[in-house]
Amino acid sequence: MSTAAAGLTLRTAEPLTREAFAPFGDVIQAEGAARHYTINGGNTERFHDLAAVEPGVDGRAIVSLFRGQPRALPFRVEMMERHPLASQAFMPLSGRPYLVVVAPPGAAPTAADLRVFLASAEQGVNYAPGVWHHPLLALDAVCDFLVVDRAGPGHNCDEVELPEALLIDLPR
Ligand SMILES: NC(=O)N[C@@H](O)C(=O)O
Ligand code: NI
C-alpha cells in the first residue's frame, strides 16, 4: 500500500483465490474445484456446485448479461454497494481479467476495510448476501459477464459513499 498523489491511498490488487475470497463468497472456477465428475458418456466434465446461489425469501434466481465498459486505472473507489437479500454472481465471458473490490458484510466500509482482487478470465465470483462490493470493474475493453442474482420484492441494493476514496491499480 502506498500514498498516491492527492493524498489518497493506493492499493494494488492481490490474486483472487478461494481461500482469500472465502469471507466474501465463492470463486467460480474449474481449477481446484472440490467436486467434479465426468458425464455425457465421457464427453463432458462437470464442475459441480461451485457457488451458493441465494435468491432469498420470495426471490427468484435470474440470469442476466452485463456488458461493462472498461475502467481506467488507477481507479478511484468512492462508493460500495451490497445486496442484503440475495447473492450476486459474475462470470466473465470475454476472456479478460477484471477487478473485484469487496468488504465484509455489516457496517458501512471505509477504505481500510476494502480488499482488492484481480480475477482472471477463468474466475467468476459469487458475492454472498450483504457483502459490500464495488459495481462491475471491467478492464481494457468492453467485456460481457453472465450474472446470476435476484428478482423479487423488497429493497436489495444499498449504496454507501466511502468517507475517503481509495485508489486501486494492478500490481506493476
Ligand atoms: N446494479 C446492478 O445490477 N449491478 C451491481 O449490483 C453490480 O454489482 O455490478
Ligand atoms: Ni452488485
Image (cartoon, grey):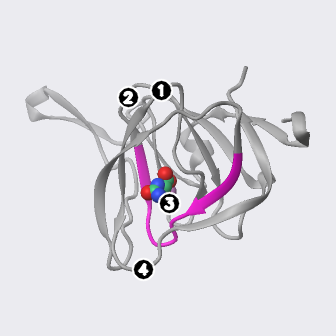
Residue 137 horizontal/vertical position (percent): 55, 40
Residue 13 in the figure: left or right of residue 65: right
Residue at image position (37%, 49%) is 147
Q: Quadrant of the N terminus?
A: top right
Q: Under tag 4, what secondary structure?
A: loop
Per the image, the residue denoted by label 1 is 141
Label 3 to label 2, Cα distance in Å? 24 Å
Start-end of magenta stretch: 77-90
Question: Contact, CB < 8 Å: mark 2 with mark 1?
Answer: yes
Residue 59 in the figure: left or right of residue 132: left
Label 2 to label 1, Cα distance in Å? 9 Å
| Amino acid type, mark 2 | Ser
Residue 114 horizontal/vertical position (percent): 72, 50
Using the image, determine if residue 94 lies above or below residue 22.
above
Q: Nearer the viewer, mark 3 or mark 2?
A: 2
Question: Contact, CB < 8 Å: mark 3 with mark 2?
Answer: no
| Amino acid type, mark 4 | Gly
Label annotation for residue 7 = none
| Amino acid type, mark 1 | Ala
Residue 133 horizontal/vertical position (percent): 59, 54
Label 4 to label 3, Cα distance in Å? 17 Å
For the residue pair 14 and 150, the one nearer the viewer reads as 150
Per the image, the residue denoted by label 3 is 128
Label 2 to label 4, Cα distance in Å? 32 Å
